[in-house]
Image (tube, rainbow, N blue to C red):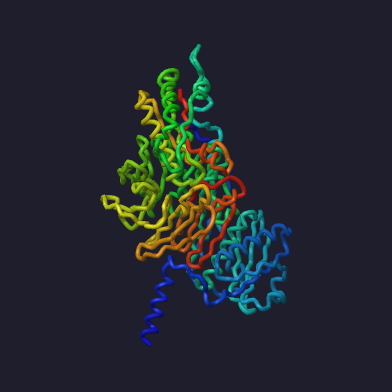
């Protein structure tokens, strides 16, 4: 009996480690169908909303989502084709004054109503945010860990022509897109705080690369500092008061810490090669990319010390990383012959175990960014000429891609 | 510093209002349970009228070559994959470039633009482009070019000279371009 208990404890510990890949779940996922009860709006918009909702429910990764569009009255019984579904989500779109969109939802479990809610949004064409909110609430009702990331905004730089880019703010599916900085050559946007109401980016339009700051509510941009060669904001501390920068005075890329209140700049690394892409880790450490072993790899060091430690022991070329708690996700080149089948994949490691989990399979996968709760990883995928933003649900072993309609994603943050 | 023109385009970007901490309960009074998604105004910063520094100039001293003419005489320096050391077959081109910068173009400063192939858009790739520019800078200084007349920038993979998915195209992108600034 004790042995069985120990085994159960071991198994539960094993599956709490995100580096362990869940190959097969014993239980099948519950089924869910979605029924549209809207009497207003044209069929094009109704179908668009339906698709957005289906996509969000899929990303939850907790249902087998039926993809058949059905139009049934809100107070009617569920469609006969859906009678054996574990859950049926009914919704109705209705118009308010001045382009306001109302959405009523009703979640039925085995025919019984278990959740109802009404949503309102100021403009019809930004319906996708209601779709995300519905998915968030259903996930919460199902007792799943919070998916706060579904509410967060993504900011990315889109290359539209050589040395021409746009900085775009979007939802996580790229359905909503607002160009925040138009024209010029601006890259590496980074949210300046948790509220996501301001951001930093690098402008390459001047004589020297310049770090700029934008308050999105006021539309005000100001220069923070410039550096010869490189000037990138790699990470922002949780309180928004400290920045990790890659600067390259005299052409030497190193990592610097900048205090936005005192304006003090502290050099963190002093290496004759390449030190870039620093991320805050724990209270007083940074994780960064360096070629000090002759190839790019992931290292850590104290902000105030010289205790440099190699963090990753797998991969020939590990050129980007993101850290959250004990987990580090990094980009690794898979092939030694770069041009035959050159793929970059993302790998996940834990600082507490020796396990490595490969998160992607084909294409160029890069720029990983953890969600704050480490439940999901956002990344850039370029494959067969298509640039996409992808999301990895770590605990569900699922990846989803949202392709960009034009241009190529250069970098992003969320 | 370039002026930033604030456009009048105002778009609504939305955040979700906080959800109730209460456990979901069935509530048929639909209007009593409305979650409104509040809009946040987001302005657009426009820098469309700005031009990349140093481009578009074509001034010349009477009788001398224009910047464009001199730039056409400068050769790009090419690099191996993931490397920033100067290849032996690039030495002669580099010396010729240094000679032009020291003599005919000595009234201008030179901007070294490091570039990479399309394999990666991360900071490391930008740093690689910069280290390539730094290698060219060191070689030019060794050839007698004044250090103060040289500036560097990296464009990473964002300034390709071609778009084909071939080794030849990628090799053309791993380069340092030399631009002249007045």
Does residue A21 show up?
A: yes
Up the image or down, A8 lies above or below B140; here it is below
Instruction: Give residue B146's position: percent from left, percent from top.
Output: 36, 24
| In the depicted structure, whether residue A410 falls above or below residue A31 | above
**Residue A352, position as x, y percentages in the image:** 35, 65
The residue at 50%/42% (across/down) is: B117
Asked whether, in this view, residue A235 is left or right of residue A136, the answer is left
In terms of image quadrants, where is residue A258?
Answer: top left
Q: How many marks?
A: 0
Give the residue at the far bottom of this rendering.
A1
Q: Position of residue A85 (x, y in %)?
A: 64, 76
Q: Quadrant of the N terminus of chain A?
A: bottom left
Q: Nearer the viewer, residue B5 or B174?
A: B174
> Residue at image x 43%, y 72%?
A15
Q: Which of B120 and B6 lies nearest the eye of the viewer?
A: B120
Measuring from the top left, give residue A395's x and y in whole percent.
48, 67
Residue farthest toward the top in the current orientation of the protein: B63
Query: Looking at the image, which is closer to me, B131 or A194?
Result: B131
């Amino acid at each position: 009996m004790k042995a069985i208990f120990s085994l159960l404890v071991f198994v539960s510990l094993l599956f709490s480690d995100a580096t362990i890949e869940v190959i097969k779940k014993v239980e099948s996922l519950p089924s869910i169908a979605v029924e549209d009860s809207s009497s207003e709006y044209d069929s094009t918009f109704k179908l668009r909303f339906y698709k957005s909702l289906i996509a969000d429910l899929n990303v939850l990764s907790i249902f087998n989502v039926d993809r058949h569009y059905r139009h049934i009255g809100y107070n009617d019984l569920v469609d006969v084709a859906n009678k054996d579904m574990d859950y049926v989500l009914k919704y109705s779109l209705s118009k308010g004054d001045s382009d306001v969109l109302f959405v009523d939802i009703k979640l039925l479990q085995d025919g019984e109503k278990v959740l109802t809610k009404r949503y309102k949004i100021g403009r019809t064409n930004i319906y996708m945010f209601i779709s995300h909110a519905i998915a968030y609430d259903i996930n919460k009702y199902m007792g799943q860990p919070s998916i706060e990331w579904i509410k967060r905004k993504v900011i990315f730089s889109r290359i539209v022509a050589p040395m021409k880019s746009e900085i775009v703010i979007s939802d996580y599916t790229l359905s909503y897109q607002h160009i925040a900085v138009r024209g010029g050559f601006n890259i590496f946007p980074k949210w300046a705080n948790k509220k996501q109401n301001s951001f930093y980016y690098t402008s390459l339009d001047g004589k020297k690369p310049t770090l700029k700051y934008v308050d999105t509510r006021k539309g005000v941009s100001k220069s923070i500092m410039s550096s010869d060669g490189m000037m990138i904001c790699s990470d922002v501390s949780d309180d928004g008061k400290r920045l990790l920068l890659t600067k390259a005075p005299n052409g030497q890329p190193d990592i610097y810490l900048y205090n936005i209140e005192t304006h003090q700049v502290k050099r963190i690394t002093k290496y004759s090669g390449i030190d870039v892409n620093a991320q805050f880790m724990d209270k007083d450490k940074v994780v960064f990319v360096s070629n000090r072993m002759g190839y790019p790899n992931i290292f850590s060091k104290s902000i105030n010390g010289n205790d440099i430690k190699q963090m990753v022991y797998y991969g020939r070329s590990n050129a980007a990383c993101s850290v959250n708690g004990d987990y580090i996700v990094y980009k690794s080149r898979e092939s030694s012959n770069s041009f035959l089948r050159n793929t970059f994949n993302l790998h996940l490691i834990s600082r507490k175990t020796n396990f490595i989990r490969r998160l992607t399979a084909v294409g160029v996968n890069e720029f990983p960014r953890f969600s704050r709760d480490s439940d999901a990883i956002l990344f850039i995928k370029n494959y067969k000429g298509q640039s996409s933003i992808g999301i990895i649900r770590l605990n569900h072993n699922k990846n989803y891609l949202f392709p960009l309609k034009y241009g190529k994603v250069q970098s992003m943050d969320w | 510093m370039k002026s930033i023109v604030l456009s009048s385009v105002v778009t609504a970007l939305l955040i979700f209002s906080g959800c109730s901490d209460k456990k979901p309960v069935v509530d048929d009074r639909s209007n009593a349970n409305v979650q409104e998604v509040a809009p946040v105004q987001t302005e657009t910063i426009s820098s469309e009228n700005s031009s990349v520094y140093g481009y578009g100039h074509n001034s010349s001293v009477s009788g001398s070559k224009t910047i464009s003419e001199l730039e056409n005489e400068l050769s790009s320096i090419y690099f191996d994959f993931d490397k920033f050391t100067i290849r032996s077959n690039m030495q002669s081109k580099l010396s010729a470039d240094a000679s032009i910068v020291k003599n005919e173009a000595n009234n201008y400063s030179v901007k070294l633009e490091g570039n990479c192939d399309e394999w990666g858009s991360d900071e490391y790739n930008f740093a690689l482009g910069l280290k390539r520019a730094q290698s060219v800078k060191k070689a030019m200084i060794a050839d007698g070019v004044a250090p103060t007349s040289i500036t560097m920038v990296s464009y990473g993979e964002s300034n390709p000279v071609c778009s084909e998915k071939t080794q030849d195209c990628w090799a053309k992108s791993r380069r340092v371009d030399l631009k002249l600034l007045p």
